[in-house]
Image: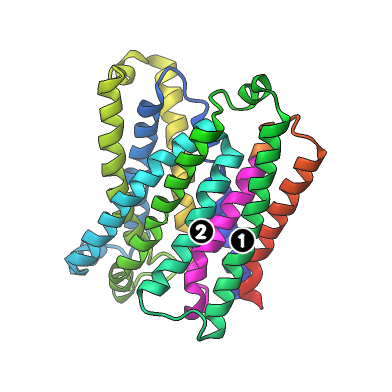
Amino acid sequence: MDSFLSILLMAIGSICAASFYVPIRKIKGWSWESYWLVQGVFSWIIVPVLFAWITMPKGTFGDIISSAPDQAKLMAAFYGALWGIGGLTFGLTMRYLGIALGQSIALGLCAAIGTLVPPVLAGQNLFESRSGILIVIGVAISIVGIAIIGYAGALKSKNLSIEERKAAVKEFALKKGILIAILSGIMSASFNFGLTAGDPLREAAITAGANPLFAKNPVIMFVTLGGFVTNFIYCVFLNIRNKTGMDYFKVTGALLANNIVFALIGGTLWYMQFFFMGMGESLLPAAMVAFAWSILMSMNIAFSNIWGIILKEWKGAGKKTIIALIIGIVILVLSTFVIKI
């Protein structure tokens, strides 16, 4: 029952993550770098700090942060900064490939690297235990599903005219988008490295009496802080280079309120994937905790492609393409149930 509930919680988080770019699309009058930075203030600073604070026992938040080793906090933020590169290119991935194909490629690589590398770096031989073998099998199944979805994306690109591609994704650029998606996927896996490095923060939270369901929240806060720094530097650089720094001031009144509200909604939805992942992970057997990252990423890909269908990004792609897409989504969902074997 705990394993099923764990999957359910992470599925809720994945629905939030796959949906975060939908409200972002409602932002008007700002360049990409401007709205990406504003939503980042919410998703990487305000919301993580708020949730970490309210989910810790009253009066213990500061003590938890100060009692954790400085190295754990610094390494969590460092890996977060590396993840930040993946985070900002992740936005570009969806800009050039769309929600469905963009998230599939980037999150697919992120799932495999983020799941398998931490145990290997810790000196664990995944083939020495049943749980380790199950983790490898689960990742392998998810990669098969991702490959099938990628095939569906290739079919879509082949079947659609340039005009049809632009109608679905205004700035569609397959080659550029795939290269950016690969970089994004590799660097985004650093988020899970940061969660691993910051584990002493989780232990400090539990020692202070925090509910294990929420003990990961202070760790998430430090990882996203590092990611914000990277994104802030890059977005401000683009603001200067593209002369878009006045974006934040030229939009006023109802339109400004619209942009802030949708940035808040999008940023909160993005953060919720890790909030629910932390809850779901706490319910897994210790030996299978490493698989939580793969579950989250696989679910993210599945739900992002469902959004892609809803937003008509696959419109006109052809019956064969849609069948391949659905098969890939089903395989991804099934890969998460390896923990039930």
Give the Cα distance between marks 1 and 2: 8 Å
Q: Secondary structure at mark 1?
A: helix
Q: How many marks?
A: 2
In the shown orientation, is residue 251 left or right of residue 258? left
Give the main secondary structure of the magenta stretch: helix
Residues drawn in magenta: 280-307
Q: Quadrant of the N terminus?
A: bottom right
Q: Which residue in the protein does label 1 denote?
A: 142
Q: Which residue in the protein does label 2 denote?
A: 111
Residue 286 falls within the magenta-colored stretch = yes
132 to 261, vertically: above or below: below
Quarter of the image where one finds residue 206 = bottom left
Q: Residue at x 52, y 40 (%)?
A: 178
Q: Quadrant of the C terminus?
A: bottom right
Q: Residue at x 43, y 17 (%)?
A: 29
Location of residue 130 in the rendering, given as x and y in whole percent from the top left corner: 57, 84
Q: Residue at x 69, y 23 (%)?
A: 161
Tell me the kind of residue under disc 2. Ala
Tell me the kind of residue under disc 1. Ser
Query: Residue 159, labelled with which disc?
Result: none
Q: CB of mark 1 within 8 Å of CB of mark 2?
A: yes
Location of residue 189 in the rendering, given as x and y in whole percent from the top left corner: 42, 56
Q: Secondary structure at mark 2?
A: helix
Residue 211 seen in the figure: no
